Amino acid sequence: MMTDVVESSGVPARHDDPAPADPIDAEPIGTDPVDAGPTGADPGDVAARTGTGDTAAAERIVAIRQRIDEIDRTLIALWQERAALSQEVGVTRMASGGTRLVLSREREILERFRSELGADGTQLALLLLRAGRGPL
């Protein structure tokens, strides 16, 4: 079960609603929305992109988002590496006459993620396992 996201209004966001375009997180990496910078945006757009008209807060938000983008790139690369390794394990196991899956290993991974991250960890582990072995 995934946790609900709470919008800035304090109301839980509905997952079945189409996601609105979010210009805040759509800003290109490496541009500084506080200045007019490479995008030519005027300072009035700062509040729209960062959710605040306070320059210091906007600068902090931009810095935090740059770090989030770095983390996202790392997570994606690790996800792809993990999936490839998992697929290699499966191919090697099957080529040697073994089974397609080792359910005890999958349970071990599910439990590790659940104990560290709770219910969302279980969902994440299920996605990781599917990426490595494909759908059942």
Image (cartoon, rainbow, N blue to C red):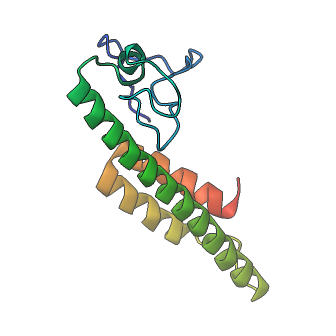
Image-based side of 135 in relation to 58, left or right: right
Viewer-nearest residue: 49 or 118: 49
User: x and y percent of residue 1 in the render?
Assistant: 44, 36
Which quadrant of the figure has residue 83? bottom right
Looking at the image, residue 14 lies above or below residue 56: above
Q: Is residue 117 something that shows in the picture?
A: yes
Tell me the residue at 55%/16% (across/down): 20
Residue 14: % across, % down: 48, 16
**Residue appearing at x 56%, y 19% in the figure:** 21
Q: Position of residue 54 (x, y in %)?
A: 23, 20
Give how far across and how far down residue 76 sits, in percent.
55, 56
The outermost residue toward the bottom is: 96
Could you say which quadrant of the image residue 103 lies in? bottom right
Residue drawn at x 36%, y 49% as measured from the top left: 67
Frontmost residue, 16 versus 77: 77
Q: Quadrant of the C terminus?
A: bottom right
**Of residues 48 and 104, the one drawn nearer to the viewer in this rendering:** 48
Q: In the rendered view, does 65 fall on the left or right side of 26? A: left
Up-down relation of residue 20 to residue 76 (above or below): above
